[in-house]
Image (cartoon, rainbow, N blue to C red):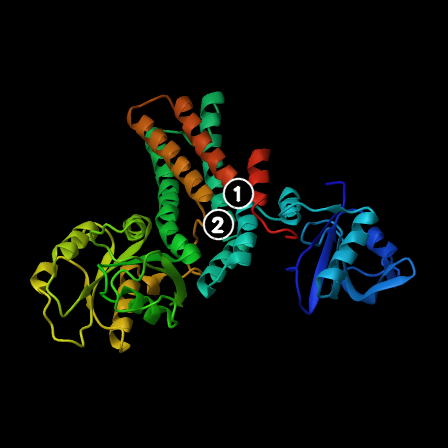
Amino acid sequence: MEDTIVAVSTAMGLGAISIIRLSGPEAIKIVNKIFRGKDLTKVASHTINYGHIVDGDEIVDEVLVSIMLAPKTYTTEDVVEINTHGGIAATNKVLELCLINGARLATKGEFTKRAFLAGRIDLTQAEAVQDIITSSTDKSLSLFVNQLTGSLKKLIIKLRKDIVGILANIEVNIDYPEYEDAPVVTIASLKQALIPIKEELENLVKESKNAKIIKDGINIAIIGRPNVGKSSLLNKLLEEEKAIVTDIAGTTRDLVEGSVIFKGIKLNFIDTAGIRDSDDIVESIGIKKSIDSVDKSNLTILVLNSNEQLNKDDFKLLDMIKNKTHIVFINKNDLPLKINTENLQDFNVCYGNTISDDGINSLKDKISDLFALEAIKPIDNIYLTNSRQNSLIKLAIKEIDHALDSLNKEVPVDLVEIDIKNAWNYLGELIGATYKDELIDELFSNFCLGK
């Protein structure tokens, strides 16, 4: 990290301001070359300085320049942020001048990568930075801010410290058996120490289901045979005319998607083509997509007509969803009831229509109950927020399970120690205490440029 990097940290396009950020040992010197105003090498840290960016004698833009001296900065290096007027031309010109005068264009996520490599944040906090940028709900924002403050990091550090204590006692007992002050390591004492650690890790995995819901939302497929009101239901749920609605069977031939925020969670609805036997090639492709969407969704809403008896297509669909998380929405309940409800006793049923709000609100409440949305509180709990974190915790649990199994079989303690060390290492990978360079490169390549 001996060079100085630069990137545009705001979205390119029209706007009130753009921010060009530099970080590195030459950041202040480089900007001072193109700044007309105070001598930036002599101003105090964490100050904002008015002036102009110039190219020789030509004024490029009127700017405010923030100076932040190491180590109390995002990257722990000297950081300069140039606030220019928004617009592509001015932004690119200032960026170009920084590059000409010695800066290097930053790679994606390189500012955060430098913060991690300098030890200011761990990997879970680095991941939280990117998640905050892409969060779309209040609950997801709370979740990632909670992780950015280091809640998961603190727990993992505590658990690793507990494991180190176990390993230290094992080592003393093996290498210095004559040392009387050291606790005697027995099978019972090891199990007593390992089981609480395993339980805390298992609780993290259990709670990760809620984290995925907070982060990604709930994917909901709306299925049914043609003309039961799927598209009307989608439009009502989204409160916009997203899908085309006609009386012609087979109007919807491809997936129509839309999202809405409900109780702080993003509900991602997918309106599908009506499922029936069809010789039409295009409609058949849409029907296949409809069936595939059921397997990919967290929840399936099967729409049935209340004023019609169930037919063979309905029974096929009921059979398709019976072992999946589902809601059977009996639509058009404003019309005379003709559906044979005795065939629906084993299903999660909700009645409503797309004319009034009552049935729609009942459907939303059913969704809330199924996923316990009211109980999901990102501030009160510590969550794993991605598959990398989840897989490493599961690997650590696997090692502890193997250690406990070995203890039950009275395997020598020095062999059991290997499994315990492996668990400690996996937890280290989680927070970045141990890591591979290619993992770090891959992780930060998913960041936006300038962060």
- Residue 142 x %, y %: 48, 61
Q: Earlier in the sequence, mark 1 or mark 2?
A: 2
- Based on the displayed image, in which of its 4 quarters is residue 239 positioned? bottom left
Residue designated by label 1: 431
Amino acid bearing label 1: Ile
Viewer-proximal residue among 240 and 425: 240
Q: Secondary structure at mark 1?
A: helix
Q: Which mark is residue 152?
A: 2
- Residue 357 x %, y %: 28, 77
Look at 35% across and 67% down and name the residue there: 244
Viewer-proximal residue among 82 and 305: 305
Viewer-proximal residue among 115 and 420: 115
Q: Label 1 vs label 2: CA separation? A: 9 Å
Look at 78% across and 66% down and name the residue there: 64
Amino acid bearing label 2: Leu
- Residue 238 x %, y %: 37, 69
- Residue 172 x %, y %: 48, 26
Q: Is residue 345 among what the camera can see?
A: no
**Total numbered labels:** 2
> Callout 2: few (<14), some (14-19), or many (20+) C-alpha neighbours within 10 Å?
many
> Label 2 near label 1: C-beta < 8 Å?
yes
